[in-house]
C-alpha cells in the first residue's frame, strides 16, 4: 500500500536527487519527520486527518518535540483524534504500543492556526502561523533550535544515524548524514545539484514500504524516487577517454562512476573522502596518495542526464583546478576513494590513470585581450546547436592575469548559416547569473565567431551605432581569446544574448499561466527570419512574414492567439487604405523605435531587413510593438557598393511607413538629434577598436582564413579592410543625410 503524506504550506525547501538510504521496517525521511509515524491507511483518511490537524502557537514547540521523541523511539501512530473544542480541547496521538501523547490547546488562544513547517537553510525546523508570511525557529525546552533529522534504521549499529539538509557555498542543496554521538563529522555528503529556489517546494510524498521506496513530488510538477537501501562501494571507474586540459587558474572536469551505482558513499573533498593522486611519485605517508602541487581536486558534482534532467545513478564529475603556479605540466593521475568495506574496515580504491596537462598561454597574452578558457566534460567536442552540453567549466582571465569569472555552465552551438562555417559560434548558459567581463549579470551569453568578417568588428560597430540612437537596449560585447579543451580557437566577441531581463530587454516577464486580460499582452521578443525553426511561430496574413517567439520560447494558446491577432491587426492597419489614412497603425507600433532601428540598418548597409532575417521586435505588457534590438551584422554589410542607395526603405513595413508624412517628420527630427554623434563618435570608435584587436586579429586570421567572398574585402589586409569599412560608413552617412533632408 502507498501512503501519501501532504505537507501544509508552499515554502517547504527540498532537494531533488536519488539517494540510497538503508531502512528496515521503519523508513523516515528528512523533511517529513513529524508525519513519519502514520501507518498505512486509506489515502482519503490520511488527507482528512492531516487537514484537520491543528496546532496553537503557544503549544507548537511542545508538540513538535513530543512527536519527534516518539518518532525516534520507533513508534507508529495508530490514530489521531480531536479532544473537545478549539479553545479547551486538543489532539490525542495513539500509538501501536498502546501509549499516547495528548497535546492540549492553550486556553489563552481564541482561534486556531494551521502551521506551515519548513526546513530552513541551516537544516532546522521553522514554523509559520501567518500562512507563510513569516517563519520562526522551533525551539526545544532548552531554547535550542531543533534539527530536521531522522532515524534511518532499526539496526543497533546505526540506531543514532541522522540526516540533515544544508545549503552549500554554490547555493545548492547538500544532504549530510551523521551520528548523534558526533554531529560534526559527516558520514555521507551528497551533492544534489539543485539550487535552492522557490519552485523546489515539496507538495507531497508517496511512501511505498513494500518496494522500500518513496517519491517526492515538487510544486513545479517534478518528482523524484528515493530507494531505501544501500551497499558499500567496490571500486571507482574513470569514464574519460581524452586528456584533461588546464590553463592558468582554470578548471576542467572528469567523469567517473562508483561501483556499484547504488553504493553508500561520501565524496567530501575537504574531508579527504576522495583525493587526486599524482602517479609515478612516492609519498612517505601511510596513504599512497601523492597530492600534486600544480593542480587540485576542488569538488565533486552529481551528473544529470542533459535531456531528462534525471540523475545518473552512481555517476559523478570531479572538478580539477590549476593552482596558479604558471607552469607547464603533463601528468598521469588517478582518483582515490577513501572509504570502508562491508566489515567497516578502512580501504582505498584507485581509479585507472588519466592525463592532466597544462600549457601556458604563450603568444595569447601578447594580444592584450582577456582569455576565455572553456573545458567540456571529458574534453568532448561540441557538435550540436540544439542540445546543451552540461557540466562544462569556464574561466575568464584578464590581461593582468586576474580571474574575471570562474564557474560551471552548459554550452551548445548557435546560428543558422554561421554554424556551418569552419569557425563555430557558441551559446553559453551559466549555472547561475553572474557578471562577465564587466557586463551585467545574466546566465545567457554568446560567443560570436565573425568568421566571414575580415575586420571582425562589423557587429561591434553596428552595436555602437545603435547605442548612438534612441533604441532602448543594445547588446554589450567584449573581444577575447578563446581556448576550448586546450586548443586556441581564435578571437571571439563575448556578447549578451537577447533576452527579457531588467538588464537587457527591460520589459515585463510574461506570466506563463495568464490566459486573459493584460497578463497576456506582454512581454514578448520575436525574431523575423527565413529560418523558420522555432517551436512557436506563425506567418502574418498581409505581409506574409515569418514571426517566431524567442523569449519566452513557449506560450499557451491564449497568448499565442493574442499575438497572432495583434500582428495581423497591425498589418491590416498598414495595408488597408482607410485605416492607414486614419493612422491606425500608430496604435500598434512604437514609431520612434522603427525610425532608430532603420537608421542602424541603413548606416550598416544591412540588406537582411528585406528578407527579413535576424530582425528582432518586442512587445511589453500593455505596450506597442517595438523594432529591435539590433543583431547580426557580420555578413554583407558596410559595402562600398551600397553607399548611395536605400537598403531598408523598401523592406518589412517601411514602404507604408514612408508614405506617412508624420513618420517622415519623425525621421527628420530624430536624424537631426543623432546625426552629430553618429558622425563624430563612430569613426573614433572604429580607430580605437582597430588598435585594440590588431594583434589578436593576426592570430585569428592565420588560423581562420576566409574562403568565401561576399563583402569584397576578404583578400585585403586587416588595416585596409578596416579603413574601407570606415570610409563606407562615412559615405553612407553623408548620402543618407542628404536624402533625409530632401524627404
Image (spheres, rainbow, N blue to C red):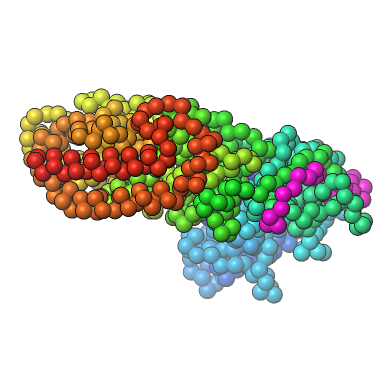
The residue sitting at 38% across, 52% down in the picture is 688
* Residue 172 lies within the magenta run: no
Q: Eyeballing the image, is 69 above or below 655?
A: below
Q: Residue 211 is drawn in which quadrant? A: top right
Q: Name the side, left or right, on which 140 lies relative to 557.
A: right
Q: Where is residue 9 in the image (x, y as percent from the top left)?
A: 52, 54
Q: Where is residue 429 in the image (x, y as percent from the top left)?
A: 52, 44
Q: Position of residue 434 (x, y in %)?
A: 51, 54
Which of the two residues, 200 or 80, is positioned nearer the viewer here? 200
Q: Name the side, left or right, on which 269 lies relative to 363.
A: right
Q: Residue 450 is drawn in which quadrant? A: top left
Q: Name the side, left or right, on which 383 lies relative to 255.
A: left
The region drawn magenta spans 323-348
The residue sitting at 46% across, 46% down in the picture is 694
Image quadrant occupied by the C terminus: top left
The residue sitting at 76% across, 50% down in the picture is 267
Q: Name the side, left or right, on which 580 lies relative to 148.
A: left
Which of the two residues, 685 or 611, is positioned nearer the viewer here? 685
Is residue 534 among the parts visible in the rendering?
A: yes
Amino acid at each position: 500500500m502507498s501512503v501519501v503524506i501532504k505537507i501544509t504550506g508552499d515554502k517547504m525547501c527540498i532537494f531533488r536527487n536519488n539517494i540510497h538510504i538503508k531502512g528496515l521496517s521503519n523508513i523516515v525521511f528528512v523533511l517529513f519527520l513529524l508525519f513519519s509515524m502514520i501507518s498505512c491507511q486509506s489515502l482519503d483518511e490520511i488527507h482528512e486527518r492531516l487537514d484537520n490537524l491543528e496546532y496553537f502557537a503557544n503549544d507548537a514547540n511542545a508538540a513538535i518535540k513530543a512527536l519527534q521523541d516518539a518518532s525516534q523511539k520507533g513508534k507508529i501512530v495508530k490514530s489521531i483524534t480531536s479532544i473537545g473544542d478549539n479553545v479547551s480541547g486538543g489532539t490525542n496521538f495513539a500509538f501501536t504500543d498502546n501509549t499516547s501523547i495528548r497535546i492540549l490547546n492553550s486556553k489563552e488562544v481564541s482561534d486556531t492556526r494551521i502551521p506551515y513547517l519548513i526546513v530552513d537553510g541551516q537544516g532546522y525546523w521553522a514554523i509559520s502561523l501567518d500562512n507563510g508570511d513569516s517563519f520562526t525557529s522551533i525551539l526545544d525546552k532548552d531554547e535550542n533550535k531543533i534539527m530536521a533529522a531522522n532515524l534511518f534504521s532499526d539496526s543497533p549499529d546505526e540506531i543514532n544515524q541522522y540526516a540533515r539538509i544544508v545549503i552549500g557555498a554554490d547555493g545548492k542543496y547538500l544532504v549530510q548524514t551523521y551520528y548523534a554521538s558526533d554531529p560534526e563529522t559527516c558520514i555521507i555528503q551528497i551533492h544534489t545539484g539543485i539550487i535552492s529556489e522557490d519552485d523546489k517546494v515539496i507538495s507531497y510524498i508517496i511512501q511505498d514500504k513494500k518496494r522500500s521506496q518513496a517519491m517526492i513530488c515538487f510544486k513545479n510538477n517534478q518528482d523524484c524516487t528515493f530507494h531505501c537501501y544501500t551497499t558499500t562501494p567496490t571500486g571507482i571507474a574513470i569514464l574519460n577517454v581524452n586528456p584533461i586540459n588546464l590553463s592558468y587558474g582554470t578548471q576542467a572536469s572528469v567523469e567517473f562512476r562508483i561501483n556499484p551505482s547504488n553504493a553508500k558513499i561520501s565524496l567530501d573533498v575537504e574531508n579527504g573522502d576522495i583525493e587526486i593522486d599524482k602517479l609515478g611519485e612516492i609519498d612517505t605517508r601511510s596513504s599512497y596518495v601523492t597530492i600534486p602541487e600544480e593542480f587540485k581536486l576542488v569538488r565533486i558534482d552529481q551528473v544529470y542526464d542533459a535531456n531528462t534532467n534525471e540523475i545518473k545513478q552512481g555517476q559523478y564529475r570531479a572538478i580539477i583546478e590549476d593552482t596558479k603556479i604558471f607552469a607547464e605540466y603533463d601528468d598521469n593521475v588517478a582518483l582515490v576513494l577513501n572509504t570502508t568495506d562491508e566489515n567497516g574496515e578502512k580501504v582505498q580504491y584507485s581509479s585507472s590513470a588519466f592525463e592532466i596537462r597544462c600549457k601556458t598561454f604563450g603568444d595569447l597574452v601578447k594580444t592584450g585581450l582577456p582569455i576565455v578558457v572553456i573545458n567540456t566534460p571529458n574534453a568532448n567536442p561540441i557538435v550540436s546547436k540544439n542540445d546543451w552540453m552540461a557540466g562544462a567549466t569556464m574561466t575568464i582571465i584578464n590581461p593582468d592575469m586576474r580571474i574575471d569569472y570562474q564557474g560551471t555552465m552548459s554550452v551548445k552551438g548557435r546560428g543558422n548559416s554561421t554554424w556551418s562555417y569552419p569557425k563555430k559560434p557558441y551559446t553559453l548558459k551559466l549555472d547561475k547569473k553572474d557578471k562577465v567581463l564587466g557586463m551585467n549579470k545574466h546566465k545567457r551569453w554568446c560567443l560570436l565567431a565573425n568568421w566571414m568578417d575580415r575586420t571582425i568588428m562589423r557587429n561591434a560597430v553596428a552595436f555602437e551605432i545603435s547605442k548612438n540612437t534612441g533604441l532602448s537596449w543594445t547588446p554589450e560585447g567584449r573581444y577575447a581569446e578563446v581556448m576550448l579543451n586546450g586548443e586556441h580557437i581564435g578571437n571571439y566577441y563575448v556578447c549578451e544574448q537577447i533576452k527579457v531581463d531588467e538588464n537587457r530587454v527591460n520589459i515585463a516577464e510574461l506570466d506563463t499561466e495568464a490566459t486573459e486580460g493584460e497578463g497576456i499582452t506582454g512581454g514578448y521578443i520575436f525574431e523575423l527570419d527565413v529560418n523558420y525553426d522555432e517551436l512557436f511561430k506563425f506567418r502574418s496574413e498581409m505581409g506574409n512574414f515569418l514571426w517566431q517567439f524567442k523569449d519566452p520560447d513557449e506560450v499557451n494558446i491564449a497568448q499565442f492567439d493574442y499575438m497572432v491577432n495583434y500582428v495581423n491587426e497591425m498589418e491590416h492597419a498598414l495595408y488597408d487604405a482607410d485605416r492607414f489614412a486614419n493612422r491606425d497603425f500608430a496604435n500598434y507600433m512604437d514609431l520612434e523605435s522603427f525610425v532608430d532601428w532603420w537608421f542602424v540598418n541603413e548606416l550598416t548597409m544591412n540588406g537582411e531587413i528585406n528578407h527579413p532575417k535576424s530582425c528582432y521586435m518586442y512587445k511589453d505588457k500593455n505596450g506597442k510593438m517595438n523594432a529591435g534590438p539590433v543583431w547580426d551584422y557580420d555578413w554583407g554589410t558596410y559595402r562600398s557598393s551600397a553607399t548611395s542607395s536605400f537598403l531598408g526603405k523598401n523592406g518589412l513595413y517601411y514602404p507604408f511607413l514612408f508614405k506617412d508624412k508624420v513618420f517622415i517628420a519623425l525621421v527628420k527630427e530624430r536624424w537631426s538629434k543623432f546625426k552629430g554623434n553618429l558622425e563624430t563618435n563612430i569613426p573614433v570608435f572604429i580607430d580605437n577598436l582597430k588598435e585594440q584587436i590588431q594583434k589578436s586579429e593576426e592570430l585569428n586570421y592565420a588560423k581562420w582564413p576566409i574562403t568565401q567572398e561576399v563583402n569584397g574585402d576578404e583578400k585585403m589586409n586587416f588595416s585596409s579592410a578596416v579603413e574601407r569599412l570606415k570610409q563606407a560608413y562615412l559615405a553612407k552617412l553623408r548620402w543618407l543625410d542628404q536624402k533625409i533632408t530632401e524627404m
